[in-house]
Amino acid sequence: MAGASANLDQRRDYAAPTHASSQITAPHIGALRLTHFRSHEQLDIACASGAMVLTGANGIGKTNVLEALSMLAPGRGLRSAAFDDMRFERRLGWTVSADIVTAQGTARAGIGWRDGARRVRLDGANGKLDDVAHLLPQLWLTPAMDRLFVDGASGRRKFLDRFAQSLDTTLSKALSAYEKAMRERNRLLQEPGGAHGSGETALWLDGLEEAMALHGVAIAAARLTALDALAVGLAAIPEAAFPRAEIALIGTLEAALRMQSALEVEDGFRARLKATRPLDGAAGRCLEGPHRSDLQTIYAAKNMPAADCSTGEQKALLVGLILAQAHSVAAQRGDVPILLLDEVAAHLDRTRRGALAEILCELGGQSWITGTDRHSFDGFETVFGTDLAAINMQENGAGNNFDARENGSEDNE
Ligand SMILES: Nc1ncnc2c1ncn2[C@@H]1O[C@H](COP(=O)(O)OP(=O)(O)O)[C@@H](O)[C@H]1O
Ligand SMILES: [Mg+2]
């Protein structure tokens, strides 16, 4: 691990946790630098380890900062955007550099995009994004997810898979391998005679279905593990503040795995794929598999499907789910994930905002929270005290330096 940067030196005393220590450092960003990322030509933020509150008018670049942080996780980030679009005024490329502080020390991670390729640096050498993600698990909640319960199942699958991914880092590989095999199978089945074909095409389909069965069962198993972990997390969040959700997974492989061995489920799925070639060929898509599963959410106290709840209730359910996820990741991995909560305060009343601050503080990780109104976060300042950095991006403008020690209370120095 690299040496800590200047502003982190004072935290060295966290570096050697013992079993006796009450508080082990949760992984967090100590310092962040964006270069040519979206609206930020260059932006430096020195961070507090508790709450990072970003405020400022619409369009000032708050979500852009969270999106930059999400570059430290696999995938295309919290906007699911194209990396090219993240280039500041279409410059050549962008970089996101972060000092990741963990109980073991500080690692410097850098993610860069240039000439159509992503490069990952970790402690001065080429690294893997999975390794960065492993150091710094993260979860996010954005306004785009407000329609999670109402819109199609794919958003809910992604929501669960992102969480499952933070428990099982091999899931993303299984998901992309499954997708790839399925796409290729769909393509072959569309070819004249493909679905009823014999010889080479049939052999090729056998191989693809073999891969789909193998990875499909791995995906379903990872989701079931995540679902069970989430149920434990949900029970740990006080129901008074955020309504409890009851969750279930609707999916053929997931259901089968509750009753049969993985091998049996795999064999069954492979056989069904083979049998449904003509059907899938006619439909132009694969009609069964983990790509069709859905996460069902019920507002427990009312026994009401989440989709039928009010907008405010749905938001509170979502926040409760994210907090439960954070709880589960912490319990399973021992590391509290960082939370990116975009515009989360707007939908919550004062009491719920206060409860959110307390739960986040108790979780003990780093939370990045944005909002237009600084006063929505008064409760956060009370709860987090000096472990909070409130950054008003308005005052500083874009392309600037934000130092938690100046912006926050009397933090650190
Ligand atoms: N590639 C880019 N280069 C420069 N500016 C960008 C780029 N992408 C988005 N922006 C600008 O970023 C702003 C939106 O930033 P955002 O972080 O979403 O604001 P908010 O503070 O409301 O969350 C918009 O003004 C948009 O024009
Ligand atoms: Mg925003």
Image (cartoon, rainbow, N blue to C red):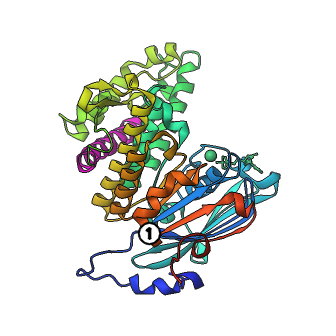
Principal secondary structure, stretch drawn in magenta: helix
Magenta run includes residue 324? no
Q: Is residue 204 in view?
A: no
User: What residue lies at 73% left-to-right and 49% top-to-bottom?
Assistant: 84
SS assignment at label 1:
helix
Magenta run includes residue 217? yes
Task: Give the vertical position of 401 relative to 55 (above or below).
Answer: below
Magenta-highlighted residues: 210-237
Task: Give the vertical position of 188 relative to 12 (above or below).
Answer: above
**Rendering quarter of residue 35:** bottom right
Residue 69 screen position, x and y as percent: 57, 58
Task: Give the vertical position of 381 relative to 64 (above or below).
Answer: below
Q: Is residue 275 in view?
A: yes
Q: Which residue is mark 1?
A: 385
Residue 285 screen position, x and y as percent: 50, 21
211, 163: nearer the viewer: 163
Q: Is residue 234 left or right of residue 339?
A: left
Task: Give the vertical position of 195 relative to 221 (above or below).
Answer: above
User: What residue lies at 59% left-to-right and 57% top-to-bottom?
Assistant: 54
Q: Residues within 10 Å of mark 1 (few under 14, many from 20)?
A: some
**Rendering quarter of residue 254:** top left
User: What residue lies at 47% left-to-right and 21% top-to-bottom?
Assistant: 198
71, 209: nearer the viewer: 71
User: What residue lies at 65% left-to-right and 53% top-to-bottom?
Assistant: 56
Q: Amino acid at mark 1?
A: Gly
303, 407: nearer the viewer: 407
Q: Is residue 25 left or right of residue 394?
A: left
324, 97: nearer the viewer: 324
Residue 381 screen position, x and y as percent: 47, 63
Q: Residue furthest left?
A: 259
**Rendering quarter of residue 360:** bottom left
Residue 251 screen position, x and y as percent: 32, 28
